[in-house]
Amino acid sequence: MKRAVFWCSVLVLAGISLWASTPITSSPQQVIEARRVPSRETILPAPAFTPDELTALPTDGWPTNGGSLYSQRYSPLDQINRDNINDLKAVWRVHLESGLGPKYSGEAQPLVYKGVIYIITGDDEVSAIGVKSGRILWKYQANLDPEISTVCCGWTSRGVGLGDGKVFVGQLDGSLVALDQRTGQPIWRTPVGHWQDGITITSAPLFYNGMVITGFSGAEYGLRGRVTAYDAKDGKEIWRFYTIPGPGEVGHETWPQDSEVWKHGGAVVWQTPAVDPELGLLYFSTANPGPDFNGAVRAGDNLFSVSIVAIETKTGKYRWHFQQVHHDLWDYDSPSPVMLFDLEIDGAMRKAAAEAGKTGWVYILDRATGEPLIGIEEKPVPQEPRQATSPTQPYPVGDAIVPQSLDIAPEGHILVNQGRIFTPYWTDGTVSTPSSFGGVNWPPSSYDPASNYYYACANNRIGLFIGGDKDEELPEPGARYLGGDFSGVPIPTTGIFAALDMKTNRLVWRQRWKDYCYSGSVVTAGGLVFVGRSDGRFMALDSATGEHLWEFQTDAGVNAPASVFEQDGEQYVVVFSAGNQFGRGPRGDSVWLFSLKGTLGPTDPPDMTAEIRGATGGAMPNLSNGAKVYRAHCAVCHGAEGEGGHGGGPSLQNPPSIHAVMRMVRQGSENMPAFAGTLVEDSILDVSGHVIENLSR
């Protein structure tokens, strides 16, 4: 597909590309995919939103990541509903021409204000798109250093912030930037850290009460996690809260007192916080402690890692916490956003906070006190003294979204403790489930206040846990700090999408997908849950039953949550279709807008078989032999399923083409040796076909 775009006016100033002086014309392909409008669209600056404006259910826009300060990802609109969902079609499609390389992931939820959509790519490039025209009104280019190497899981951003006439951007180079909402031109830029030290920002900043609040990524690089608030006017720091407490602070006693390992203790914040203005509290969840897999060097519970934390919005002072995993050894961090809602329990309305973790449980707490609203029991767990294991772990009352034990041992392994959750391990390795990739990862959940149903995207994957004897010394700045290895077993991962009743924390319905579930969801008053698939489909499910009602092929992995809004009496759904490093689907760069008045149908799904035949002159690989070659030569660095990412070889789950894979196998790449002298040409074709056919889907 031709993606060249002819701009009427291009102005490049200090790293920003600005297309605002004249409306943008479209390429011939875009004429088909985007409507023209006779007049220019005006960008209206957003106000300094009041707390009441940001806690209201979103209708004529989507002003903050999650839809409101409560992060429910719920729309009260019902023009699009169960009865007419089959009439939903695309209004237009826009190619952003950014973040298309294999290292990028498209995970951003669009923001919408007064007829303009704001979206960011994995390259931290921000575009403002007119709802009516589908034209890019301005574009900001971050011009990131291509040498940035301390990003955990693909170059990505999960969205932007909006307020006070500015668009706020957290960047992978450790900068927080405020753009003029009308032009995309930078107003201020605050260096909040150095990527060389492992500090990057992947979450969407939050505008609240004149502040811009953000967390930081980098748990695998020996960071001390933090959440920081900056003045929205000039970017000056207002307060900072460290998620690993220092001497004299609550929780510091849960770290060794004869070591400075706490200064490298992780507990970073991967997502946008939620806020309760009435209580004056801000809520977020934290990642694993560091080093991930060596508990011997950090005896104790390691607060506030793998915890839901509440702090004061005005001062950043600690109020309460609840730890989901004590002394985590399994990388069971909590990267999914905390959600707030009101819930009737025993005849009384209670203020709830909930978050779904990698353990596969949803933790439901009183958001004023941090006490469980639905019971959470401390239960004894198996011990491994060499790992300084915690004697007990929290078990929420209710249902787990994913399996938490194994009934059959994977080939080549012996089950210990039936592979149950919290089974400890040492350097020989132990299989158990969920894996460090399993359960609920970063994809945000959604919540329907009418039914009290909570919708979560998870994965069922078996983990091979190895560690305990690495990273005994404190890390140098920017160095990996894992204490072991991210490993797996060659058993296919399946996605799980589920609905739970928050009044009981019990499953209402649950689905198993053949592909990963790696996309956030949004639920509407029309009885629909919109969720993306890594194979390019954008889907609508019946929110009550999970019935598959509608789907639309976008031709790239939909690994980002959609946004829902109304303009001029018409309801729209907008979603980013770009693929993801771990989603294993095709890559793209498209923003799609849908409505009942749309006229564009779906694209054809990507045809991997046709690509292979075209690249090999008709020859097809022996995939069975390719899998054997992969296990023998590739899995040790790239992971059993090509996941890569943590300390080994790069991910192979989004290969650019069969040509590129075969060339890489023959010639090598960076630290990868050349296999031209080791493998015969047929085996090179076979293993490359295995990567394309079995690992990229």
Image (cartoon, grey):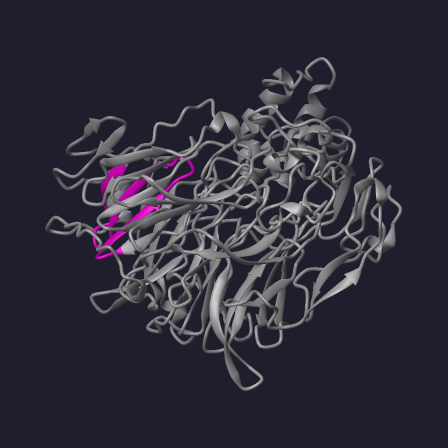
Q: Nearer the viewer, residue 283 or 592?
A: 283
Quadrant of image for the N terminus: top left
Query: In the drawing, does residue 67 fall left or right of residue 264?
Result: left
Residue ranking furthest to the front: 248
Query: In the drawing, does residue 530 fall left or right of residue 234?
Result: right
Residue 556 in the image, given as x and y percentages of width and height: 46, 45
Is residue 125 inside the magenta stretch? yes
Above or below 190: residue 114:
below
Q: At 51% across and 70% down in the image, what residue appears?
A: 352
Q: Nearer the viewer, residue 690 or 391?
A: 391
Evaluate whether residue 620 shows in this view. no
Query: In the drawing, does residue 520 fall left or right of residue 415?
Result: left
Q: Nearer the viewer, residue 605 or 472?
A: 472
Is residue 175 inside the magenta stretch? no
Query: In the drawing, does residue 607 fall left or right of residue 628?
Result: left
Quadrant of the image occupied by residue 113: bottom left
Region in magenta? 113-139
Q: At 74% across and 26% down in the image, what residue appears?
A: 633
